[in-house]
């Protein structure tokens, strides 16, 4: 059954492929784009094109970038002796927003997950190894979520990097700031107890 | 503060202009587009461009279309003697999905709303008048939501069209099918009583 003009159908179907966008939302977005000014709608189309054309992986840290090396790797004010390993480019954004971390990054683009057929070779682990061998670092901070796969990935990295004289740490897991003990799940609470520090 | 490569920033900001898309969702969509295949991402960009280039208002009914007149206006199997007046092209889709209505449509592109500075001249009302004068119709069905503005728009149309010998009706308002009396609001329930029909 035909409800829309063909190019509207096509637009709705393409928008519906975005994550979290169902048929109703796709229709709403399509009609929004049709009602909005040409400039605004075409700006979105151009932004998609430009990003797909320009964005590549940084040859040093594997972050998404439009200049190689990326703006973090070329930033000389950052500490080269510390590398924070994350699963995904999005995680870098989250950490950068704290404004506290001044070292470098390395993006694995996934975590070890045998169930999904992802082993160490599919991740940017050999790039990390090559990197620390070329330019020695003191510490690698594993900032990966604490799922079973995340833990396994952390352990795997520690086993590879410790023999090279590199300190491997992982970020603390515990009660979120402002979080109520009452509503914390058991695993988080257990982690919070394990990671307790002395009050001085 | 710079968290993303420039073309990622731009993509996130353009996506963030879509209705119901906040900064977090915009970021998620942007990274999805960066991770997806070139074909899929560029298909979306092209669909936006194509729709903006091709879609215009149908010269007869003011529906959005890529061919003028639109596929509903050119459909000879539909009853030309009945015109259903709607606020928005989306409403046509909703009515078409019922598969029950076989007349034609007319899109007003808004309703009379003095508060928002929208008077009859901003709507496609003169086009409707010209249309019924050129090709006489028996009935105009007002299918507009029953807000104060919607009612006013319906009344305005009735006042214009009745002198031309056209029957002007509005769709029934009442209890949704499957809806519970208990949860219906007072206005809907009042309308349901007013619109009661005899059981035969």
Image: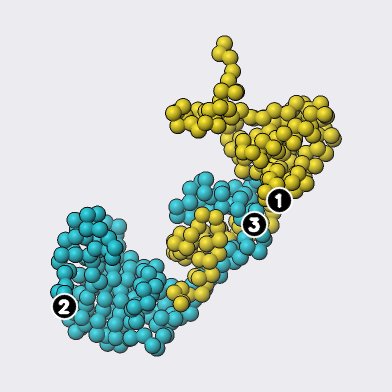
Chain colours: A yellow, B cyan
Which secondary structure, mark 2?
Answer: loop
**Image x and y of residue A77, in percent:** 71, 30
3 and 1 marks in contact (CB < 8 Å): no
**Image x and y of residue B194, in percent:** 15, 66
Q: Quadrant of residue A86?
A: top right
Cα distance between the residues tagged 3 and 1? 19 Å
Q: Residue at x 24, y 85 (%)?
A: B138
Question: Does residue B171 lie above or below A79 as drawn?
Answer: below
Q: Which residue is mark 1?
A: A117
**Image x and y of residue A15, in percent:** 53, 62
- Residue A121 is at least partly visible in this image: yes
**Do dots 2 and 3 share one subunit?**
yes
Cα distance between the residues tagged 1 and 2? 66 Å
Q: Quadrant of residue A110?
A: top right
Q: Nearer the viewer, residue B3 or B139?
A: B139
**Image x and y of residue A21, in percent:** 50, 57
- Crowd band around label 3 with a 10 angstrom C-alpha radius: few (<14), some (14–19), many (20+): some
Q: Of tags 3 and 1, which is closer to the observer?
A: 1
Task: In the rendered structure, find residue B200 and report the number of the disc placed on it.
Answer: 2
């Amino acid at each position: 059954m035909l409800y829309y003009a063909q190019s509207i159908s096509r637009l709705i179907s393409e928008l519906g492929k975005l994550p979290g966008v169902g048929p109703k939302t796709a229709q709403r977005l399509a009609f929004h784009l049709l009602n909005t000014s040409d400039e605004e709608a075409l700006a979105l189309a151009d932004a998609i094109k430009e990003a797909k054309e320009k964005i590549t992986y940084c040859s040093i840290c594997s972050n998404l970038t439009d200049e190689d090396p990326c703006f973090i790797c070329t930033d000389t004010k950052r500490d080269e002796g510390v590398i924070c390993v994350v699963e995904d480019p999005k995680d870098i954004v989250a950490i950068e927003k704290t404004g506290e971390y001044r070292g470098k990054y390395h993006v694995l683009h996934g975590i070890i997950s045998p169930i999904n057929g992802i082993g160490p070779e599919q991740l940017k682990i050999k790039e990390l190894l090559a990197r620390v061998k070329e330019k020695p670092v003191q510490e690698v901070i594993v900032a990966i979520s604490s799922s079973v796969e995340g833990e396994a990935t952390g352990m795997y990295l520690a086993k590879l990097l410790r023999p090279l004289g590199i300190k491997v740490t992982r970020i603390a897991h515990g009660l979120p700031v402002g979080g109520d003990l009452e509503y914390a799940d058991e695993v988080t609470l257990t982690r919070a107890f394990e990671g307790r520090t002395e009050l001085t």
